[in-house]
Every structure is written in structure tokens, then in C-alpha cells.
Amino acid sequence: MEHNSVDARELRKEYHYGSRVLECYVDRPRNVHALLAETVARFAQKEAVFCDEVRLTFSELDDEVARVAAGLVGLGIGAGDRVAMLLGNGVPFVVLTYAAARIGAITVPLSIREQMPGIRHALVNSEAKALVVEAAFSTIVPEPTETPSLTARISVGPAQGFEPYENLRQTAPLTQPADVDEEDTATILYTSGTTGVPKGATLSGLGIVHSATNFVKTMSLGPQDCTIVVVPMNHVTGLVAGIHTLVRCGGRVVIMREFKAEKFLERAASEGMSYSLMVPAMYNLCLHQADLSRYDLSKWRVGGYGGAPMPAATISRLADALPGLGLMNAYGATETTSPATVMPADQTAQRRLSVGRPVPGAEICVMDEQGCEQPPGTTGELWIRGAMVVRGYWRNPDADAREFAAGFWKSGDIGMIDRDGYVHILDRKKDLVNRGGHKIFTAEVESVLTACVGVIEAAVIAKPCPMLGERVHAVLSVRTDHASEDEIKKHCASQLADYQCPESYTMLDTLLPRNANGKILKQQLKTDLGFAHP
């Protein structure tokens, strides 16, 4: 199907992974190390990274990477070895990402919001040989007896039983990079595990380079651009859309540890941020918790978002406050190495419920339960193929057989493609509400709810019912002085079929719970409300 256009001469079909024929960029770095090396050669003295008091040019970043790479080699880490990172957003995360790539090692970023069982699973499953951890999180690292493969424990900051990170930097720089094939795994990212034990998606150099290039192409990014990475770097969005994309185009990465609307906007103004990629809730919080007119945001021209539709009211208010900002929906997953679709900014307002068109090189099909492609406007499961789709999961052939077919990843998302070629995400398979045989797409109902006065966020979940199986329940984060349940019910009745309208509500004056990736934790809401199936 038609995708976001680039010059056809930039792409060609290539044979990869032993079974896939994929459209690939002809001109591309040959691996993750080369992605950095090419930019260092072009922009050595240009600022690359800023975090707290630390500012590094690309040349200085390259030197840090070379020293830490040599330090890892000194600890016996080499090509193919896994280097786990339990780190928040910061310079060490960026440095280690490229240091591992230089020696051909595989990074395993871990969420700092994870607890010991999840960390243990990732360390044992990946057979990580080294772990770099922030001192504050050293207490949730399993005992050495539980992680027999782990031969090097390194801490940023003092922690008992861990070697100081600073020691890695004391070695002479490693000048000769490993010879790494682009199909080799560069990073293992463990999925959130909503359907069971987390699986390690294997991101290759080929996939990372393609996704970074697609962000650069579809969002017209270049060396003049600056982003603030405030989403977690240990998630595919922070890693690919934040770090790798800005390195690919020679731009600047400003790092923040956590999102606070006013501090984010202050930094955006002072550093001249031009590109962001966040969840819609973050844009909403900027509008609700700050006066945008107080900040010089004149350089902010690309506002990427994903994970949920952008409420119409948010799009309108942002257009009024920041007329130079183009909002661009981007849909993807860990398994697609970030973007599978991107919405052109000039189409966002009139196509608010679409996630855009496939990125260059991506194929997206809507398939029914029998594995047959569906015509435009018909719903089914989205299957995605392209150079950015991972080869599979780390040492998990059962999951590979279940979730991949002929190079397509079965997304688990229910969607459709309209007659203009725009992709729509209607729901996760597991989030559908089945009310007496009526299948209700929760995203559609949530979009109506967030348009109501006083509603900040909405989550629609299934409430068990002995008669109908399930009923529609809405959990709302509201401004209590503005939101009226009666008015919300009237609005829904005017916009939705009767069976789609929520039949019960939970109104909260706090934000809804989210995971580290910014997605609302619907299962937690079901559990808290006593709706979870035993």
C-alpha cells in the first residue's frame, strides 16, 4: 500500500535474515557504530548531548564512547556479549549504547520502574555478561548466585559490590571497532509482558538505522534540530526516536530525567527545542499546567506523538498557542523498532483518529482470522513487514512462530486502512469490549470522552456482566470543577451508538496510571475496580 513518499531511487529490494525480501535505503550506515561514526566525521565540533551540567560535542562523545568501549573490553566483554543497563535518562546511557556497538556487544536496556523479578528474568534470559546500574537501583539487582552469567557489575555512583563506572573511562580509547554485520542484534528490548512473560525483541543494526532514517526523512530533521528526550531511554521511543535519530541527522540531544511540564518548557525555550516525541498526555499537561505564552517556543516545529489519539481539544489549543508547531502521529512498537506509520503534519487535524501512512519501506496489511487480507475500510489485525521489523524474539522460537509470518509481525492491534491509504488503530485485541455480541473499540469511545469539558484523560474498560458478558465502563481523569457526569453522558449519547456509551463511570482527580512507555495501565484499573477476571 502507499506510504510516506521518498524518492523511489533511495530504496531498493534486498534479501535479509535468510527469508525476507525488504525495501531498504540504499545509502545507509552499515551498523549502529557507523551511524555515530559518520556523524562524528561530519560534525565533530558540533554539540551532540546536553544533560545537567554536561555538554559534549560529537568529538567528545566519540572519545567517551571509545574509552568506555575499551573499559568493557578490559572486563572481558566482546562481540555478541550482552551488556544490561539499569539506568535512567543520562549521558552514561548514551555512551554505553554506542560503546557496546563499537565492540559488537548487545545492549539490554532495563526499565528503572521494574522490580527485582522482572530484572532477574531479563538478566537470566539474555544471559547478560555485564550490568551497568545507577547506584540508587543497585538494591533491586538480584544476588550474584541468581545471575550466573553476570561477570561484571558496574555502578554509576558508589554501590557495594559494584565496580565504579568511572573506572571504565580510565582506559586508552579503543580505535578499532568490531566488524559487525547489520543483521546482527544490537539491542534486546523486553516487551511489557501484558500477555505473559516479557519477551526480548531483537533490534538489529539494520532496523535501528532504518527507523532513525525514517524519522529523519518523514519529519525533515537535520543538524539544526534539537530534541529533549524526556520519555525513558530504555524504551524504544527514547532510544530510537530520541538518541539514534538525532545522531543520524547530526542534531542535538537534550536529556531530562523526568517530565514536569514547567521544567520541560523552560528547557525547551532555553535550548531551542525544535522536535519532540511524547505521548499525548504530556502535551495535555503542558496546556493544563503551564501558560505556553510565557516561554519562547518559536523553534518548536515538530511535535511527534504516539500511544493514543490526540484529543481534538488539545490539537486546537496547541494550534492556537503554537501556530508553528506541526503535530505528527507516529505509530509503532518495540517489534517495529519504533515507527511503522507517520502522519504528515498538514493532515493531523482532519485525520485525528488516523496514525498516518506507512513509513518508507513498510508494508501494512489488514488480515482476518483466517489470514486473508481485508479490503479498505474493513477491520482486522494489522500485520507489518519492513526492514525495521525485528528478526524475532531472543531465544524464543515458540513466540516467533506465533507472532511472525513470512516476515510480517502480527501486531495484535485491530485496525483498518481507509481508501486514502491512512491507517487507523481501533483497539488492542485484548482491550475490545464484547457487550452481548457487539464489539466495541475502546479507542473510539475514549476519543469522544476526551472531547468533553473537564476531561483530561479517559480509559474505557470491560465491566463483567452476567447477562451481557461485558459492559462499557469509563475511568476518567477530570477537573472536578468543570466535569459533569450528566453532561458527559449527554455528549456520548449524541456521538455514539447506544451500546457504545459507557454505562458506568469512575471519576478521578488524579492522572491515570501509566507504564514507563506512557501507556495507560488498563489491567491495573480493572484490578483496582475489581473487574479483573480471576
Image (tube, rainbow, N blue to C red):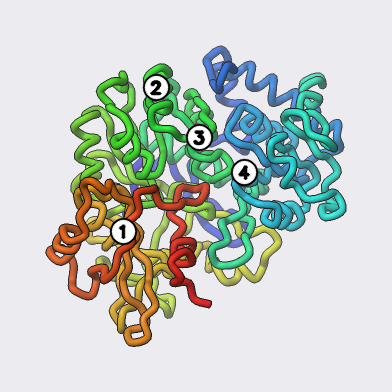
Q: Foreground mark, 1 or 2?
A: 2
Q: In screen coordinates, is 7 left or right of 233? A: left
Circles 2 and 4: CB atoms closer than 8 Å: no
Which residue matches tag 3?
258
Relative image position of residue 193 (x, y in whole percent): 57, 61
Read off the residue under disc 4.
Answer: 112
Tell me, yes or no, whether the two marked residues, 1 and 2, touch with CB atoms within 8 Å.
Answer: no
Say which amino acid is labelled 4: Ile
CA neighbours of label 3 inside 10 A, class few (<14), some (14 to 19), many (20+): some
Q: Residues within 10 Å of mark 1 (few under 14, many from 20)?
A: many
Query: Who comes first in sequence, dot 1 or dot 2?
Result: 2
Identify which residue is drawn at 61% across, 31% down.
94
Nearest to viewer (mark 4 / mark 1): 4
Q: Compared with residue 263, is residue 416 higher up or lower down, i.e. above or below?
A: below
User: Could you tell me how far apart the alpha carbons at marks 4 and 1 are, in whole angstroms?
Assistant: 32 Å
The disc label shown at residue 266, or none: 2
* Pointer 3 or 2: first along the chain: 3
Report the front residue among 204 and 328. 328
Q: Residues within 10 Å of mark 4 (few under 14, many from 20)?
A: many
| Gap in angstroms between the C-alphas marked 2 and 4 | 25 Å
Q: Tag 2's secondary structure? A: helix
- Amino acid bearing label 2: Glu
The answer to whether one can see residue 50 in this image is yes
Q: CA distance from mark 3 to mark 1?
A: 30 Å
Give the mark, 3 or 1, whose residue is nearer the N terminus.
3
Q: Nearer the viewer, mark 3 or mark 1?
A: 3
Q: Which mark is residue 424?
A: 1
Q: Position of residue 132 (x, y in %)?
A: 73, 37
